[in-house]
Amino acid sequence: MAKRKMSMKYSLPVIVFKEGKSFIAYTPALDLSTVSDTFSGVKKSFNEAIELFFEEISEKGTFKQVLTELGWQERNKGFVPPHVISQKTETFSVPVSLN
């Protein structure tokens, strides 16, 4: 008997930053990141990575296990990702030895 496929929608926090000439997209909800030379490219590759991630854990039968390990909560026959409470730039002073 074939498995029934369904579509689920999630709102995930996504951080996009630039490192040198590369754009990096990262979501702490899945501990997943992608990189591209352009902003539009990183958005596209990130969407593809999300689709592959969920496809893989679904096919392996590890959907519940993986999401639970990533801090997701099971609610109403679905899962809710962890919420980012705050994101800001902090300044730290750290001792370094320049030998």
Image: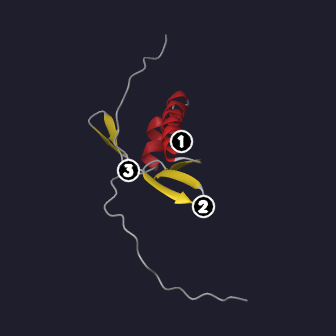
Q: Residue 13: which numbered mark, if any?
A: 3
Front position in the image: 18 or 68: 18
Secondary structure category for the residue under label 3: loop
Q: CA distance from mark 3 to mark 2?
A: 23 Å
Front position in the image: 72 or 28: 28
Q: Three-letter amino acid code at disc 2?
A: Gly
Indicate left or right for 42 with 64 as reference: right
Give the residue at the far top of this rendering.
1
Q: Quadrant of residue 15?
A: bottom left
Mark 1 or mark 2: which comes first in sequence? 2
- List the residue tagged with mark 1: 41
Q: CA distance from mark 1 to mark 2?
A: 15 Å
Q: Three-letter amino acid code at disc 3?
A: Pro
Q: Three-letter amino acid code at disc 1?
A: Gly
Secondary structure category for the residue under label 2: loop
Q: Residue 20: which numbered mark, if any?
A: 2
Mark 3 or mark 2: which comes first in sequence? 3
What residue sits 54% from the left and 52% below the top? 23
- Local packing at callout 3 (Cα closer than 10 Å; few below 14, some 14-19, many 20+) is some
Determine if residue 98 is in view.
yes
Query: Where residue 77 sits: x, y (%)?
Result: 30, 33
